[in-house]
Image (spheres, rainbow, N blue to C red):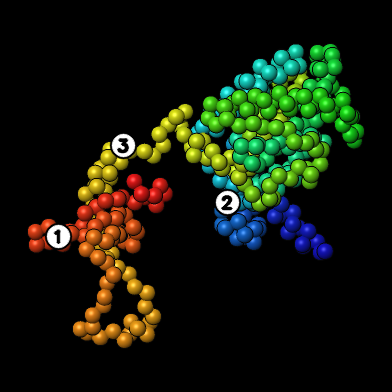
Amino acid sequence: MSDEEEIDDDAVAAEWAAMAAEGGDDGQDDALIEGDDDMAAAMGGTDRVLDQTEIDSLLGFDGEDEDTGSKSGIQALISSGLVAYERLPMLDIIFDRYVRMMSTSLRNFTSDNFEVSIDNMTSIRFGDYLNSIPLPAMLAVFYVKEWDNYGLITIDSNLIYSVVDALLGGRRGTAPMRIEGRPYTTIEHTLVEEMLTVMLKDLCEAFEPLSPVEFKLDRLETNPRFASIAQPTNAALLIRMRADMEDRGGRMELVLPYATIEPIRELLLQRFMGEKFGRDSIWEGHLVKELYNTEVPLEVILDEHNMTLGEVLGLEVGQTMMLDTQAESEVEVRCSGIPMMTGRVGKLGRHVAVRIEKVLDKKKGAL
């Protein structure tokens, strides 16, 4: 490198320092843009650099917990596991009632200050939910007899250790000790199973005003692969709940595949109990009145013959066909090919008439 080049570098550096001192931040930005035209072209000609907050907003990472709020930006595009949440107003009422009942029941069960609250209700692909479960955890599969399908309750390790510690007489004010890599013992399985029985009983009572149903514990699993109750691509309703026991507690999650709640979907669409959804009595009365004024054609079948296609094609104009019906024979009256009534043919004035004797019903026979 020559002395002339070194002098030029020093001069450029001094010029930049002078521009920064005179123009402040704007002068520094202008100098940077003038010194690097390629970067300015790549940024689309703008003279402002995005800060971290704007970058997080663009990508959809706002620094808050994933459970709260909805995703936006690029994060919303790549979150293919999320599905549209169908608003079911009655389901909100049921689970609000459920957490209040469960708080009382678990408070009596543990003899501790137990408070349950709902974090949020979302929809998710069932397979993506299984992959997102933090292990270790216990997964309770329960069967719904009336709906002929299954549901899932997930209890995390913090809540398991807290409940076991409370039931076995652990002192308050000290967080339960968690041992990593240790499988759950038989005592822990038994105590958690008793707690799940209480939770499912409250869930039955929460659904009772809407539709009588029984939730029965089927099995306990610690491996998500063995708790698969639906296809991975099926949509499921996820209710995240938090349990607080003063200085300890944890999370529990209830998963109901949409196929499970499909039998009572119409009831869950109600805004309040007993709502007459989509019914208009004025329109019903008008429709009934117009139906009774509708004209329908009736056909009197005097006789029927079975003929071959060749015989039908051989018929000629003026040919006579003999009917076996007598003057007092019973004939059938049809509407669009459906037998409606039977009667006998007679004459009234100059008109041929039929006297109705029986009204037919396809389900109950003759009336």
Tell me if residue 60 can be seen. no
Q: Residues within 10 Å of mark 1 (few under 14, many from 20)?
A: few
Q: Is residue 217 above or below residue 54?
A: above
Q: Is residue 108 above or below residue 193?
A: above
Of the residues under marks 1 and 2, which one precedes in the sequence?
A: 2
Q: Amino acid at mark 2?
A: Asp
> Disc 1 versus disc 2: distance between alpha carbons?
103 Å
According to the picture, the residue beneath numbered tag 2 turns out to be: 47
Residue 120: image quadrant is top right
SS of the residue at dot 3?
A: helix
Q: Amino acid at mark 3?
A: Ser
According to the picture, the residue beneath numbered tag 1 turns out to be: 347
> Disc 1 versus disc 3: distance between alpha carbons?
44 Å
According to the picture, the residue beneath numbered tag 3 turns out to be: 281
Query: Which of the two residues, 143 or 58, is positioned nearer the viewer here?
Result: 143
Query: Which of the two residues, 77 or 292, is positioned nearer the viewer here?
Result: 292
Q: Amino acid at mark 1?
A: Lys
Q: Is residue 18 left or right of residue 182?
A: left
SS of the residue at dot 2?
A: loop
Front position among marks 1 and 3 = 1
Kindly identify the residue that appears in the image at 49 percent across and 39 percent down.
266
**Residue 175 x/y as whole percent:** 82, 20
